[in-house]
Image: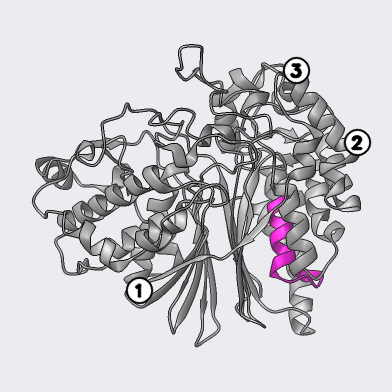
């Protein structure tokens, strides 16, 4: 899709939306997503009479086509929903699940050591996808339009193609060696084994056909029949362990969101299988005992870091799939527990992480996932974070499906105490087991005060939680979406014991003084995250939307 074609399409879409508003057919809506075409897909569905949940289906599916580095039908995701008419608030868990043939030692050698990259690259790294089931569930239970109507924009993008971005080309360049290992996958994304030229058009006819099967047959269009046969046969031929029984058994689950408060803000966020809501609220509970607005900026960042250190430590010890383990959620979210952790924080000295648990080796982190946020003037809303894990997932698509598979098996703890690609350590709570969901950091979140409602989230691997945390602290200052998505970021996750920071996040004086307090610091090679945020002013009904300037997304409010 060329820029001119997109411009004409967007003008036509604007006209449709304007007509719908004048005729009173639809409420005003704000959408922010990581790609302009995905945002446009959401508004196209609104213009056709869909609600925000139909729009969420359209945006999710569109992102699966136009942002294959971050999400896709071969991955999974979470959708946090609020329906205004009956105040239903729920969390759709479409996280991937380990195949039934999976076992704790599947990524270990004969001596019990982790085999490098085995949980990252190729068919064995792929868990059973949840995104297609999530789209069907969201459409059938909460939407107004048919699934086929909501998938139409994504099918069109896959069929007609779209112009790839320079960001897409850069990520291809970082993953070209993995993608070129499989002939079929290479043919989809590469040009003769190399990164395509600037302004190249990416067409995905096989993915379009898979989407059409999903549109026509619902869940069975992906998890049964022709598509399922191709998926299972392709995975097994490439050394994976999927079976038809795995696809038959996969189900999304609706869960009760995690809820808490901070300085008068009601916070609703992701429950396990995500660690996001618990770690986020535990951190905020610790910080609630400090007046961060009156503290020196250096000490403020020191205290935020120390709170993150302790909450991420608990993540490593206690969190996993709640369908398989007992999680001490009440304890972790207790204000008394937070007060105990707060009492161990000194204003004049950092606590080394190995004082909390034994030291562990450092490992590099990845950053790929995607997020979108939607709200309408009636306060129906969706925060959705979707993923295939690292950029382009496992780097493998089963032939004739167009479905690029995830490498979410790396999000399990392959060995207790070992780090995954994001540098996160895990314990037995997140060990591999058949049919188990791996722990995630995805943190789709709602914020609410008497005056404002916000919807936000971001990709970024283990740094997702800290980015949402900083956005909430900025919201607490009274700032608006443009500020939340733009603020410079810093991060600490217990292990490795280091503050990672964007160049603009810390001044040289802050770096020096934080070092004096005992912190180790490391500037990131590039800025990270791609936050998408929308807001409704409850008093004026004004809608605002913002996309992270670090990405290529689009935020828009209907006329």
At x 74%, y 69%, the residue is 142
Residue 1 visible in the snapshot: no
**Residue picked out by circle 2:** 226
**Residue picked out by circle 3:** 183
Mark 1, secondary structure of its residue? loop
Residue segment shown in magenta: 46-61
Lower position in the chain sequence, tag 1 or tag 2: 2
The CA distance from mark 2 to mark 3 is 21 Å
Model colouring: one colour
Q: Nearer the viewer, residue 250 or 429?
A: 429
In the picture, which quadrant includes the C terminus?
Answer: bottom right
The CA distance from mark 3 to mark 1 is 52 Å
Residue 424, given in percent of the width and then of the height, sits at 40, 37
Dominant SS of magenta comes to helix
> Residue 478: which numbered mark, if any?
1
The CA distance from mark 1 to mark 2 is 53 Å
Q: Nearer the viewer, residue 55 or 550?
A: 55
Lower position in the chain sequence, tag 3 or tag 1: 3
Q: Residues within 10 Å of mark 3 (few under 14, many from 20)?
A: some
Tell me the mark number nearer the camera, choosing from 2 and 3: 2
């Amino acid at each position: 899709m060329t820029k001119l074609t997109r411009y004409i399409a967007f003008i036509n879409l604007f006209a449709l939306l304007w007509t719908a508003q004048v005729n009173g057919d639809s409420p005003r809506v704000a959408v922010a997503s990581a790609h302009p075409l995905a945002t446009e897909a959401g508004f196209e569905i609104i213009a056709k009479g869909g609600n925000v949940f139909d729009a969420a289906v359209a945006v999710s599916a569109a992102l699966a086509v136009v942002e294959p580095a971050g999400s896709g039908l071969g991955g999974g995701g979470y959708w946090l929903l609020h329906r205004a008419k009956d105040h239903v608030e729920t969390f759709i868990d479409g996280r991937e699940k380990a195949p039934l043939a999976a076992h704790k030692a599947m990524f270990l050698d004969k001596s019990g050591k982790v085999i490098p990259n085995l949980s990252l690259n190729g068919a064995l790294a792929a868990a059973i996808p949840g995104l297609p089931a999530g789209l069907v569930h969201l459409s059938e239970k909460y939407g107004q339009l048919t699934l086929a109507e909501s998938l139409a924009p994504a099918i069109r993008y896959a069929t007609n193609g779209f112009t790839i971005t320079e960001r897409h080309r850069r990520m291809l360049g970082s993953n070209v060696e993995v993608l070129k290992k499989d002939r079929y996958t290479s043919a989809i994304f590469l040009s003769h084994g190399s990164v395509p030229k600037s302004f190249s058009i990416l067409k995905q006819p096989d993915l379009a056909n898979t989407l059409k099967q999903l549109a026509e047959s619902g869940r069975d269009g992906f998890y049964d029949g022709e598509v399922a046969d191709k998926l299972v046969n392709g995975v097994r031929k490439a050394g994976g362990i999927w079976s038809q029984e795995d696809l038959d058994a996969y189900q999304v689950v609706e869960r009760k969101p995690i809820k808490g408060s901070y300085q008068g803000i009601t916070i609703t966020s992701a429950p396990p299988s995500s660690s996001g809501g618990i770690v986020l609220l535990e951190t905020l509970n610790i910080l609630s005992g400090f007046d961060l607005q009156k503290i020196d900026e250096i000490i403020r960042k020191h205290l935020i870091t120390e709170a993150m250190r302790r909450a991420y430590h608990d993540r490593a010890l206690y969190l996993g799939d709640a369908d398989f383990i007992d999680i001490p959620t009440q304890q972790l979210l207790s204000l008394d527990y937070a007060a105990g952790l707060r009492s161990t924080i000194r204003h004049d000295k950092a606590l080394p992480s190995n004082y909390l648990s034994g030291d562990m080796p450092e490992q590099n982190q990845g950053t790929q996932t995607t997020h979108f946020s939607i709200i309408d003037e009636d306060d129906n809303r969706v925060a959705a974070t979707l993923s295939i894990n690292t950029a382009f997932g496992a780097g493998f698509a089963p032939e004739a499906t167009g479905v690029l598979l995830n490498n979410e098996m790396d999000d399990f703890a392959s060995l207790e105490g070992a780090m995954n690609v994001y540098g996160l350590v895990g314990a037995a709570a997140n060990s591999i087991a058949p049919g188990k969901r791996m722990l995630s950091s995805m943190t789709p979140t709602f914020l609410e005060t008497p005056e404002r409602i916000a919807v936000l989230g971001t990709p970024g691997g283990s740094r997702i939680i800290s980015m949402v945390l900083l956005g909430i602290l900025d919201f607490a200052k009274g700032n608006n979406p443009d500020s939340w998505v733009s603020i410079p970021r810093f991060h600490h996750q217990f292990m490795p014991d280091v503050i990672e920071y964007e160049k603009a996040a810390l001044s040289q004086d802050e770096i020096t003084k934080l070092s004096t307090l005992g912190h180790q610091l490391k500037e990131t090679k590039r800025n990270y995250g791609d936050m998408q945020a929308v807001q409704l002013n409850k008093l004026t009904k004004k809608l605002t939307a913002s996309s992270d300037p670090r990405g290529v997304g689009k935020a828009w409010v209907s006329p």
